[in-house]
Image (cartoon, rainbow, N blue to C red):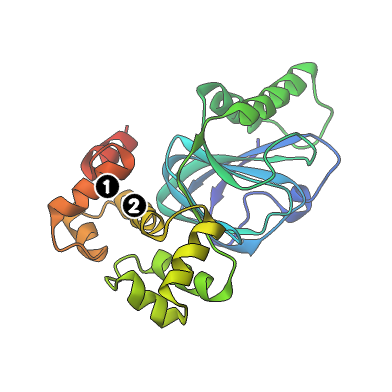
């Protein structure tokens, strides 16, 4: 059985297995226990990282992906990434050979029940030995379900230009910074009009919308760590609790308390 306790040191799957292109088309593992904090790395197989409890933040060179319970991150083969779990983490991962017809870019997707069930079944198999026809069928189901899984908006794309990337990483790491866009642009050494135009061109989002999403994703992580809503609002730079709740509801459709309660079910 491919089951292991996740720690900040151990990989979910040994490096040689994650880079193995022969053998099973899908290798699934379970992850549970201590919060993960994994440095940037890459491997030859693509990877699905799914959460059943706790929120997982996956960092790639193109952006930051937040994976709440019931969702998964897809990372294409050789995609450089690191990860950090917020709250006790319980989930699963599947490593898939290249050429399976899955997306060419990292993304967050909703996990259908059939995908979850098939992955959990596959995680109980031994890595070595010939596969049965039933195992081959379940692997095909996993790939097919991934191909058709609904996408989710819990991604924070990053710009490429050096100064804008510096600004974006600062805002993503410090969403409570209350400086307005012109002040942040001056800090990064870029003209406000240039920032407005190029940021939208490189990320596909207006800066103000991108900044709100950064706040929401950070709030989701803090909710997973069971911080009080009032403390989260203050950390994110909101003087008014009601203003923070209204922003969160506009972006997600639910209040922070409703979101936290739904994720505990």
Decide which of 111, 61 is in the foreground and name it: 61
Residue 143 in picture, x, y percent from top left: 69, 29
Residue 43 in the figure: left or right of residue 237: right
Residue drawn at 71 percent across, 37 percent down: 27
Q: Please identify the residue farthest to the top as the structure is shown.
A: 134
Q: Secondary structure at mark 1?
A: helix
Residue drawn at 37 percent across, 75 percent down: 184
Q: Which mark is residue 248?
A: 1
CA gap between label 2 and label 1 equals: 6 Å
Please report contact status of discs 2 and 1: CB closer than 8 Å, yes or no. yes
Residue 148 in picture, x, y percent from top left: 61, 27
Q: Quadrant of the N terminus?
A: top right
Compared to residue 105, the image places residue 38 above or below, namely below
Residue 107 in picture, x, y percent from top left: 57, 44
Q: Which residue is mark 2?
A: 216
Residue drawn at 56 percent across, 29 percent down: 149
Compared to residue 134, the image places residue 101 above or below, namely below
Q: Residues within 10 Å of mark 2 (few under 14, many from 20)?
A: many
User: Is residue 44 visible from the viewing direction of this image?
Assistant: yes
- Dot 2 or dot 1: first in sequence order is 2
């Amino acid at each position: 059985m491919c089951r292991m306790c996740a720690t900040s040191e151990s990989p979910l799957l040994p490096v040689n297995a994650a880079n193995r292109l022969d053998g099973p088309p899908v290798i699934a593992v379970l992850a549970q226990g201590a919060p993960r904090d994994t440095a940037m790395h890459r491997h030859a197989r693509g990877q699905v990282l799914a959460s059943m409890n706790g929120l997982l933040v996956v960092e790639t060179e193109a952006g930051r992906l937040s994976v709440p319970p019931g969702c998964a991150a897809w990372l294409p083969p050789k995609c450089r990434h690191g990860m950090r779990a917020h709250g006790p983490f319980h989930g699963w991962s599947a490593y898939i050979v290249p050429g399976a017809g899955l997306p060419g870019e990292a993304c967050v997707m909703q996990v259908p029940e059939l995908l979850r069930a098939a992955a959990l079944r596959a995680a109980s198999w031994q890595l070595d030995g010939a596969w049965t026809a039933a195992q081959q069928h379940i692997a095909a189901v996993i790939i097919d379900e991934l191909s058709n899984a609904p996408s989710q908006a819990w991604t924070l794309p990053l710009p490429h230009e050096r100064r804008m990337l510096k600004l974006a990483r600062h805002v993503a790491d410090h969403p409570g910074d209350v400086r307005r866009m012109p002040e942040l642009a001056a800090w990064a050494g870029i003209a406000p009009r240039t920032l407005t135009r190029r940021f939208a061109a490189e990320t596909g989002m207006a800066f103000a919308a991108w900044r709100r999403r950064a706040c929401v994703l950070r709030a989701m992580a803090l909710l997973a760590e069971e911080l009080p809503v009032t403390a989260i609002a203050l950390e994110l730079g909101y003087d008014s609790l009601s203003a923070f709740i209204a922003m969160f509801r506009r972006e997600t459709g639910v209040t922070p308390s409703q979101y936290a309660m739904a994720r505990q079910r």
